[in-house]
Image: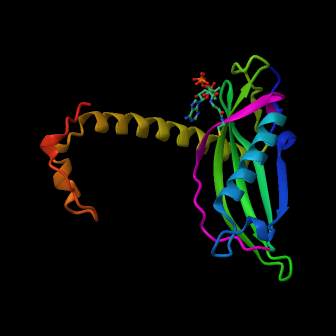
Amino acid sequence: MAPKSVASSRTTLTELMIPSYANFGGKIHGGILLSLMDKVAFACASKHSGAYCVTVSVDGVNFRQAVEVGELVSLMASVNYVGRTSMVIGIKVIAENVRTGTIKHTNTSYFTMVATDDDHKTTEVPPLLLETPDETRRFLEAMKRKELKEAYKEDFDNEKSRMRLEDGGLELLKKERCVVDYDYGDFDDKK
Ligand SMILES: CC(C)(COP(=O)(O)OP(=O)(O)OC[C@H]1O[C@@H](n2cnc3c(N)ncnc32)[C@H](O)[C@@H]1OP(=O)(O)O)[C@@H](O)C(=O)NCCC(=O)NCCS
C-alpha cells in the first residue's frame, strides 16, 4: 500500500454556534462539540483510508473554556498516527468571536477511528507519509499515548482484581465524601 501524506486528509469543519445548541446556562452543550468532533474525525479518517470508519475510542476531551452562542467554532483534524486498521485523529478546536476577532483554543482531543470494509470487517489503512518535524512529533506522541493507555488498562485490571472491600477498600472510603449505609456482611462480593 502506498503511503499517504497528512496534508491529503487534513480536514476543517466550521460551524456557527446557534441558540438551540445552548444549555440552561446559555453556553454551548459539550455534546454538540463532541458530535462535531466525531464528524470531522470521520471525514479525516475516511479520506486517509478511503473506507467507512467507526469511532473506537476518544481520548483527551477536556473542555477548558466555555463556548458561547454566536461564536464560530472551527475543528481542525489531521491523522496523527496509523496502525494496521486504526488511525488516531488529532482534533484542535478553536472558537472565534466574530465581532472582536478574539480566538480561543477550547481543546485538543484524539479520536481513534477504525477502517471497515463492506462486510463491516476491519481493513488495512495506508501508511502515513511524514513530511514535517511536527507530523513526526505527533506520530511519536501518539505511539507513547497508546503505550501508556495499554499499560494503564493492564495496571487497572490488575488492581481491580486484587481490590476487595474487606482488604482496606472500606478504610479508604473514610477519606471520601460518601457514607457506606449498609451492612457489608449482607452482600457477597463475588456475585
Ligand atoms: C471498531 C471495531 C470494528 C474493532 O473490532 P475488533 O474486532 O475489536 O478489532 P481489533 O481488535 O482487530 O481492533 C482493530 C483496531 O482497533 C484498535 N483498537 C481497538 N480498541 C481500541 C481502543 N479502545 N482504543 C484504541 N484503539 C483500539 C486495535 O488496536 C486495532 O488497531 P490496529 O489494527 O491499528 O492495530 C469494533 O470494536 C466495533 O465495531 N466497535 C463499535 C464501533 C462503533 O459503533 N462506534 C460508534 C460508537 S458511538
Q: Is residue 109 left or right of residue 179?
A: right
Q: Residue at x 83, y 23 (%)?
A: 2
Q: Residue at x 28, y 65 (%)?
A: 177
Q: Residue at x 78, y 54 (%)?
A: 76
Write down the quadrant of residue 70 in the picture.
bottom right
Asked whether residue 4 appears in the rendered view, the answer is yes
Q: Where 127 falls versus 171 (above or below)? A: above
Picture coordinates of residue 102, whole percent (x, y) = 78, 78
Range of magenta residues: 48-69
Q: Quadrant of the C terminus?
A: top left
Q: Where 120 falls versus 54 (above or below)? A: above
Q: Is residue 50 magenta?
A: yes
Picture coordinates of residue 180, whole percent (x, y) = 21, 56
Q: Is residue 159 magenta?
A: no
Write down the quadrant of residue 25 in the picture.
bottom right
Q: Quadrant of the N terminus?
A: top right
128 or 16: which is nearer to us?
16
